[in-house]
Image (tube, rainbow, N blue to C red):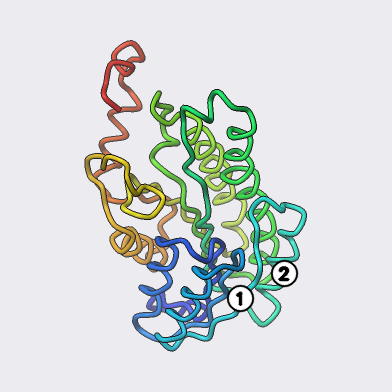
Amino acid sequence: MIDALGNPQSVLLLGGTSEIGLATVEALASDRPLRVVLAGRPSERLDAATARLTARGCAVQVVEFDARAVETHADVVKAAFAHGDVDVALVAFGLLGDNEQAWTDASTAVELAQVNYTAAVSVGVALGEHMSAQGHGALVAFSSVAGERARRSNFVYGSTKAGMDAFYTGLTEALRPAGVTVTVVRPGFVHTRMTEGLKAAPLSTTPEAVAAVVVDAIRTRKELVWAPGALRYVMSVLRHVPRPLFRRLPV
């Protein structure tokens, strides 16, 4: 259970190789070792993540998880809770994709929708069930500022994140009576493997900086945060720019 200082004892990372997710787990483990469940597809990167957390003193359990295999999600989450309560669950998987390919190729667009939205909803339902049953916990969903207003440069990805964001924003209200806090995180451009080779956007940040925002949100039970925080005000302005003017902006 999360103690009075906001420190958890156990964490589930869905997206076991996510750089932002791993940075968050490490930040949570800075005060004391954690029991960590890494859920991801078997790979050298997942092995490396396991070794990285084990070296920090964490007790790591690996559960095979494929976002595309929706029919397995309930069993994956059940396995994660099999050895005790999960204090913090991080939904940290997703695809960026190529926008120009996605809006002209149905299979690419559908894959983005399945991973970023359908799979996120699937695990969210399962997590909600288990966390409600245990009567406590923090569920963190990594959304994106791209979902706040569709832009020509990444509207397919943005649309999938908009759906995910709406689901977890609603789940926040649904799970509050059960004692479960849901936090939606809206990062901007983060320097990771996913964005490697892309031109950095203004207010770009790092996995470690996002992790710091997330840890603070968990400890203070915040339900919606931006990373960095200044994006909250930027996006508030952009949401209200008239469409004829918005389409002329270099975004």
Q: Residue furthest bottom?
A: 57
* Badge 1 amino acid: Val
Frontmost residue, 155 versus 237: 155
* The disc label shown at residue 235, or none: none
Classify 158 as above or below 122: above
Q: Residue 38's spot in the image, x, y percent?
A: 56, 71
Measuring 46% from the left and 27% from the top, which residue is drawn there? 100
Give the residue pinned by disc 2: 78
Measuring 60% from the left and 50% from the top, which residue is drawn there? 120
Q: Around disc 2, counting alpha carbons within 10 Å, would you say few (fewer than 14), some (14 to 19), or many (20 or more)?
A: some
Q: Residue 196's spot in the image, x, y percent?
A: 34, 49
Instruction: Say left or right for 184 vs 31.
Output: right
Q: CA distance from mark 2 to mark 1?
A: 13 Å
Measuring 33% from the left and 16% from the top, which residue is drawn there? 247
Classify 112 as above or below 87: above
Of the two numbered discs 2 and 1 on the same chain, state the one appearing first in sequence. 1
Instruction: Say left or right for 210 vs 149.
Output: left
Work out which quarter of the rendered image holds the C terminus and state it. Answer: top left
Q: Residue 185's spot in the image, x, y percent?
A: 42, 51
* Badge 2 amino acid: Lys
Q: Residue 103's spot in the image, x, y percent?
A: 53, 25
Give the residue pinned by disc 1: 62
